[in-house]
Each structure stands twice: as structure tokens, then as C-alpha cells.
Image: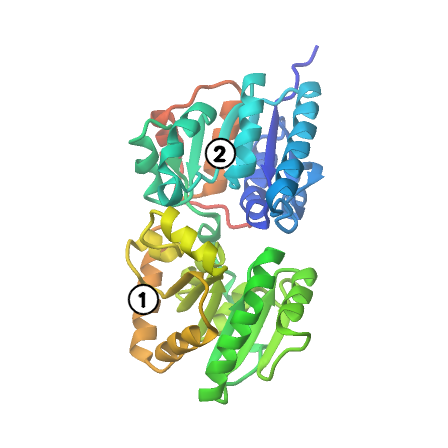
Amino acid sequence: MAPARKVILFTAQEPSGDAHAAPVIARLRRDHPEVELVAWGGPKMEAAGATMLGRTADDGVMGLAGVSKVLQVKALHDEIVAWSRRNPVAVHMPVDSPSANFPLSARLKPMGARIVNLVAPQLWAWAPWRIRKVRRISDILLCLLPFEEDWFRSRGVVAKYVGHPVLSHALDEMRIEREAAALPTGAPRIVLLPGSRSSEVRANGRLLADAFAGVRTRLPGALAVVVASNEANARNFLLAIGGELPAGISMFVAGQGGTIEGAIRWSDLALAVSGTVSLDCTRQGKPMIGVYRTSRLEALGAKLVIRARHLLLPNIIAGRRIVPEFVPFAGRAGQITDCALAMLENPERLARTSADLRVVAASFLGRDPARIASEVAFRSALGERLGNAELDAIVESGTSSPDVSW
């Protein structure tokens, strides 16, 4: 009788998790076709070759509130656990979203699954006391940010910095330049990046548009391009601003009228909703302002809970304020306008910011997160007990040739 195929289960609840998991799935399919890859996730995971058992990451669908969210998460977990009883899981790879994935991992681990977290939870920013839960539930944390490895290891967790998928592959310079050249001509040029989740777009769309309108009042030649992550979010942006694009603003859907990389290259400044997109700007050395609209009550609560000095990824990685961040923000668009004008009217500041961001991007060179994560998952599926020394050896075994296909 042939041995049973080893099952690796991926679970993602947001578009960013879908994007993080896809290159790992593709690498496993290429290097280890003997394992079975299944997922509750999104379209990128499906395109990479996972057998999709449920769609949970198309638009941050777990982002409901209160009782509705609790019931939705429990129903999903019940479905996944029931499937896993019929199909034993060797490795569970939860992707980010700890509030949804931690309880699921806690149910799958007693069933024999090894828990390999793809994206370490950012406990250092908001909940360091939850480290005991991580030690109990997780077998391995794969860290995307350079400082996280030491933070978790010093607290008794098996962890390894693997690099970040946004910064691990080369840019297609010819395509990006071609796309940038096709966008409207004028100056200054501002790219508006309203986020990938519908809730983010609805909350921040008007703020971004109003901030740009203020810039255009002072600088009438200013132009803006909105990059919508999908058609639904293009509609969400229009709804957020009242139905029509204001003067000077155009919009396209990523993958249909160009890519986010081309729009970033075209711009002089990005107004970006806080998240992974700040690293898309970082790798091109593009000056940006990070924003994230919340209510006044939520902003006050965040100040009481969040422990990190900075909340925008490039600032977190640098350990200092490189770019302005309005995160969380309950103020007026005029504050962002004033900040944007101060940057746009100071070429030396723009150049210094660009140089600082390129230093941050360079700190990620030399690691291939898809290769490392796929090897850790495969060896864990075979039953190997990987500690910090074994993870170090996996990273050192090949760090100079990242997979650029994604």
C-alpha cells in the first residue's frame, strides 16, 4: 500500500494573507509535488496551485464585528476541523490574522497537526503578554521583519526571520516604466492607495481624496491616481467620495489598467493606507504618508493598547520616523494636506526620505521567504522536529538566489 500523502493546510482570512501564502504554495508545488496542499483562502492561493476548500480571503471577509464575527469564525473553524478529522493534517500554516487563526490552531494541534505560522503575530506592538499562548499553540514562527526573530527567541519561541515576500523578488523595470509612462502627465503626481479591504477603502477614501483636493488648491497642476485592488473596491472608493472622481483624480483597477508598481513609479508622493503597501513604496524608495482613519474612540483606545513607537512598517523596521504616519487618525484631511505640501515643496526632504527608504529595503536582501517557508513546511510534514538551529541551517543553505517568479 502506498503511504498516505502528507497534507499541508493553509488558512488566510485577508487579501494580504492570500498574497503571502501564494509564493509558498507555488514553491511547494514545484519542489515537493508529493505533498497535498489545501487551503481556505483567496484567488492567489488558488492560482498558485492549492486545492481550495473555501474562499475566506477575497476581501477580508472575517472583518465583521461583535457577535456576527464570533459566530462566523466559529462556523468556519467547525467546518475546517470536521474536514481535518476525515483528512488528517500534517502541517497547519496559518497566515497572519491571529485573532481568527490562533483558535483554529489550538483545535488542530491536539489532532496531530504541526503549527507553522507564516507571518509571526505582531505581539511586540500590542500584546506581549500573549507570548505564553504562542508558546503553547505554535511550533514554529516564520518572521517577516528582521528584528522579530530575536524578540521571539528571547521569549522561548522557535522562530526564524525569512524575509518579506514584497521585497524578495526583483521588479520588472521595463514593465513598470512602460506603465508609468502611460499615466497622466502633470506635476506634482500623487498616488492614492486606499487599501485592499473594503472596510479600509470605505473608511479612508474620502480622507485621501480630500487631502489631495487640498494639495490641488495650492498646486493646481497636481494629479492623482487611485489604485483600486479590485472592481468592488473601485466602487467602494466612489461611494466613499460621493459617486464621482473629483478634478485631477483618475483611477484604475490593479491588473486592468496597470499595476501598483507602475503607479508608485509614476508618482512623486504616495498617500497610503497603512499596511503591506507601505513596503511596495519602500522598495522603490518612494516618499509616502501613511494614514489609517478611525473614530476618535478607537484612536484613543489604540493609544492605550499599542506599545510600539511607530506603526508604519518602514518606520518600524528603521526604528525611527522616516515617513509621516497618521495611524490611527481621527483628525481632518487638512492635516494630511499640510504634511504633503511640506514634503512636495521641499525637494531635499523628498530625496532624503527616498534614500532612507532604500536603506530599509536593502535590509531584506538575500533571503527567499518562499524557499525557506516551503522547506520548513515540508520537513515539518515529514515529522522532523525543527528547532532554532535547524531553522538557521535551512536559511543558510541557500539565501542568495531568491525565486523571482512571483
Pointers 2 and 1 in contact (CB under 8 A)? no
Using residue 352 as the reference point, say whether residue 242 is left or right of it: right
Q: Nearer the viewer, residue 406 or 141?
A: 141
The three-letter amino acid code for the residue at tag 1 is Ala
Q: Is residue 12 above or below residue 248?
A: above
Indicate the quadrant where residue 55 lies.
Answer: top right
Q: Residue at x 70, y 29 (%)?
A: 79
Q: Residue at x 53, y 25 (%)?
A: 106
The residue indicated by pointer 2 is 117
Using residue 107 as the reference point, say whether residue 231 is left or right of it: right
Q: Is residue 30 visible?
A: yes
Q: Nearer the viewer, residue 45 or 126?
A: 126
Q: How many marks?
A: 2
Using residue 86 as the reference point, say whether residue 34 is left or right of it: left
Q: First in sequence: mark 2 or mark 1? A: 2
The x, y position of residue 157, in whole percent, is 37, 28
